[in-house]
Amino acid sequence: MAESSLFILLAGIVVIGVFYLFDIHWIDPRIVVGFLALLLIPGFYAAIKSGPFVPSVRKRHKNMIELAKMTDKDVVYDLGCGDGRLVFSASKVAKKAIGYELSIPLVLYGKLLSLFRPRSSIRFGNIWSQDYSEATVIFCYLLPKAMKQFYQEVWPTLTPGTRVVSNAFAIKDLKPTAEDEEGKVYLYVR
């Protein structure tokens, strides 16, 4: 939520500055700032439905990647990828890494960064309506209710052998195949 507020603040300052510098009077800058605020609605929906953007520390990313035991043949998906950091880390090893996010400011930021990172892609999309049939590794950092939904809706559609690595929240109805030494990252194999 903080990234969304920062996006509106910065975009609003830029819009009002441009209107002031170029003496634009034909449109009210409040309308433009209001439009920018509307862009935040999908991100708020995602924060409520699956979890807000909370960046993980690098050590946690490293633990997730190590637990997944990725190779250059893996196709990785990050559900609710935020700013794409984990996607970019995974793309250094995997065949390709794809992140789905609903927060428009985060998608734009991630798409900008992905221009410089081959084999990675940040996509605007609802994680609950995607096809993960080609996935060999799925990363999740979802709230407990969303993890339950993942287990009920996505888990049955995964190809046997797909590795699911969850950050912080376990799938309650499933015993993890492995955990990191802190007990904060869980690996499940379909």
Image (cartoon, helix red, strand yellow):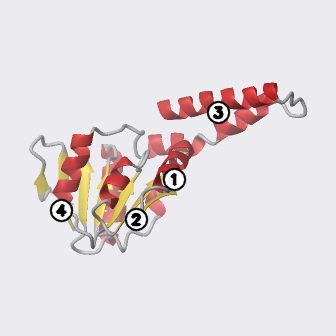
Residue under circle 1? Answer: 111
Which residue is drawn at the image coordinates 33% and 63% (left, top)? 76
Q: CA distance from mark 2 to mark 3?
A: 30 Å
* Circle on res. 12: none
Q: Quadrant of residue 88?
A: bottom left
Dot 1, crowdedness within 10 Å: few (<14), some or many (≥20)?
A: some
Residue 133 location (% of width, % of height): 37, 74
Q: Are marks 2 and 3 in contact (CB under 8 Å)?
A: no
The image shows residue 162, relative to residue 166, as above or below, that is below
Task: Kindly indicate the quadrant of the structure image that contains residue 69.
Answer: bottom left
Q: How far across and how far down the image is residue 132, in percent? A: 38, 69
Disc 1 secondary structure class: helix
Residue under circle 2?
119
Q: Secondary structure at mark 2?
A: loop
Name the amino acid, label 4.
Lys
- Mark 4 lies on residue: 69
Percent position of residue 29, x then y: 78, 30
Circle 3 residue = 11
Marks 4/3: CA distance?
40 Å
